[in-house]
């Protein structure tokens, strides 16, 4: 006999994200069963459920007890490390599940793994969702952005739960059914790629303000706080302001200056760039952010290069550039450069999503994606409402850059943007994200590019042929013969 009071849903995997999401579900009034292979985590979660408001959460110590404690058709969220641990958890749990039950993977999983598991689940009569969850620990506990893809029926089974658990913004909960297959994971992956781009662009703004503008951490905190009240209002700008305020408890000054300049990563940004290349979509800002993480890792080599190049006569030009700078104007220019660079980065991410959506027939709704990123997730920002509206105005928008509203904003900001990039280049302060965005903009907006010359070269050395601007057809020319015979 099954126990009388069954839970509405289950969650397996009680590391930081799992614990917090389970408590969030319980707090929204949905009784939840939890399970973890290491049983101390179950007890820890039970304790928290008690102290955080006697929440309706029950702990289970075997996969069987756990599964049998959930009401049918069962929905079970798993939040374990992506890859093999997901397969192991599915094997352990699905042995006790029945046709019609659902597995929901909430990790940062590679979308093809989800597509494989969907088929495996179907073979057992089980339903499957790959659900991107964004917002870190705080988001999981109080309202994340959720990106579920896979079985529509499985989504409908948990719709009432996820709509309450997700972050709430003025135009609804930050969750929507993304599409079939691995679309939920793919959308989350691109969210992370955009997150890499945003973080890189912010770090470049910091670098320019600090080194060209000479701003102190106190001033930087003020500026980022100020920016967070305007068009740049976002979670990442807000936390950046906070970071500049934290003093170093082990010494003088602020902690940020004591942090080793090597960025870690778990892989979703790399997947985004790989997918962009696979789909022939230009994503230079996101790629620049990834390259910067790689270069940041070469700390010893960078220190050595600094030394070798100084010995070879490299001069530090920052001081001379700084002396000619109007600080107030620089701050305002950097704000505009950051905003314009962001638009280009989001354009790249959205266009990658569109290419994949066409390839996989996912029918992604870009306005809805921008909407569910307005709250809960790491890239949440006021600016996403403008992106939502751009796609509502035109669901087939070729690029955010040519949306009439964004186009106006780009034009208004381009002079400032060029000044910042120009100053950074002359000071020798690398701004790969801002430069990549600007080059993307300048390439995309030009009706005529020097690609004609590349085509001519290809035709010359490989007879790859070319098209003409003035007549139909495919052409080949004996370039060398003609060029040399002439003279
Ligand atoms: C989120 C984040 C999260 C991601 C971290 C770390 O949306 O909550 O994207 O899922 O794991 O940001 O990513 P990296 O370690 O690759 O920087």
Image (tube, rainbow, N blue to C red):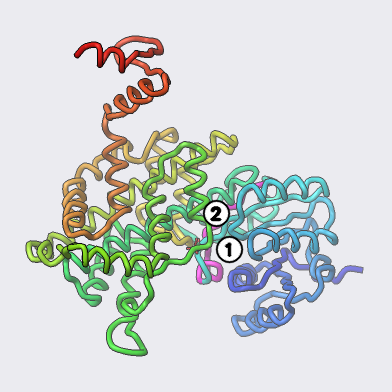
* Crowd class of label 1 (few under 14; some 14 to 19; many from 20; radius 10 Å): many
Looking at marks 2 and 1 on the same chain, the residue that comes earlier in the sequence is marked by: 1
Corner quadrant of residue 347: top left
**How many badges with numbers are in the image?**
2
Q: Is residue 128 left or right of residue 192?
A: right
Label 2 Cα neighbours within 10 Å, binned few <14 / some 14-19 / many ≥20: many
Tag 2 near tag 1, CB within 8 Å = yes
Place of residue 461 in the rendered image (x, y in percent of width and height, measured from the top left): 38, 23
Question: Can you identify the residue that label 1 sits on?
Answer: 165
218 lies above or below 398: below
Q: Is residue 314 left or right of residue 308?
A: left
Asked if the magenta segment contains residue 145, the reply would be yes
Q: Position of residue 313 (x, y in %)?
A: 17, 63
Name the residue: 67% across, 50% down. Answer: 114
Q: Which residue is mark 2?
A: 175
Quarter in which the N terminus is drawn: bottom right
In this picture, which residue range is highlighted in magenta? 138-150
Residue at 36%, 49% (x, y): give it. Answer: 285
């Amino acid at each position: 006999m099954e126990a009388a009071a069954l839970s509405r849903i289950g969650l397996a995997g009680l590391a930081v994200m799992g614990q917090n999401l389970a408590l969030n579900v319980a707090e929204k009034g949905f009784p939840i069963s939890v399970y973890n292979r290491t049983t101390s985590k179950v007890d820890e979660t039970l304790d928290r459920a008690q102290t955080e408001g006697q929440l309706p959460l029950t702990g289970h110590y075997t996969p069987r007890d756990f599964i049998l404690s959930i009401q049918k058709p069962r929905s079970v969220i798993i939040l374990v490390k992506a890859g093999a641990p997901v397969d192991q958890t599915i094997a352990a749990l699905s042995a006790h599940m029945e046709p019609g039950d659902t597995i929901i993977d909430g990790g940062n999983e590679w979308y093809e793994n989800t597509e494989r598991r969907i088929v495996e689940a179907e073979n057992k009569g089980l339903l499957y969702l790959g659900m991107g969850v964004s917002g870190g620990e705080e988001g999981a506990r109080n309202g994340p952005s959720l990106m579920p893809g896979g079985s529509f029926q499985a989504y409908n089974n948990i719709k009432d739960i996820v709509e309450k658990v997700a972050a709430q913004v003025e135009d609804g909960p930050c969750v929507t059914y993304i599409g079939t297959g691995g679309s939920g994971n793919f959308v989350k992956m691109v969210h992370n790629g955009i997150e890499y781009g945003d973080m890189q662009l912010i770090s470049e703004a910091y670098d320019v303000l600090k080194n060209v503008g000479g701003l102190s951490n106190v001033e930087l905190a003020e500026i980022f706080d100020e920016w967070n009240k305007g068009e740049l209002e976002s979670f990442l700008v807000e936390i950046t302001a906070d970071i500049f305020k934290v003093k170093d408890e082990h010494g003088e000054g602020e902690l940020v200056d004591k942090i080793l300049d090597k960025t870690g990563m778990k892989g979703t940004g790399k997947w985004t760039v790989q997918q962009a290349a696979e789909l022939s979509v230009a994503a230079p800002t996101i790629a620049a952010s990834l390259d910067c993480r790689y270069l940041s890792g070469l700390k010893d080599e960078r220190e050595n290069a600094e030394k070798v190049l100084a010995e070879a006569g490299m001069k530090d030009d920052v001081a001379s550039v700084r002396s000619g700078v109007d600080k107030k104007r620089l701050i305002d220019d950097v704000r505009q450069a950051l905003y314009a660079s962001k638009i280009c980065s989001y354009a790249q991410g959205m266009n990658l999503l569109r290419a994949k959506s066409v390839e996989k027939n996912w029918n992604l709704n870009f306005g809805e994606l921008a909407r569910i990123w307005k709250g809960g997730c790491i890239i949440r920002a006021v600016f996403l409402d403008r992106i939502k509206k751009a796609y509502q105005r035109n669901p087939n928008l070729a690029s955010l850059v040519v949306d009439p509203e964004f186009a106006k904003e780009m034009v208004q900001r381009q002079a400032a943007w060029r000044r910042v990039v120009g100053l950074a280049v002359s000071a020798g302060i690398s701004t790969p994200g801002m430069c990549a965005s600007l080059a993307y903009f300048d390439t995309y907006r030009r009706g005529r590019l020097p690609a004609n010359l590349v085509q001519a070269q290809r035709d010359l050395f490989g007879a790859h042929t070319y098209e003409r601007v003035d007549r139909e057809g495919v052409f080949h020319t004996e370039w060398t013969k003609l060029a040399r015979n002439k003279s």
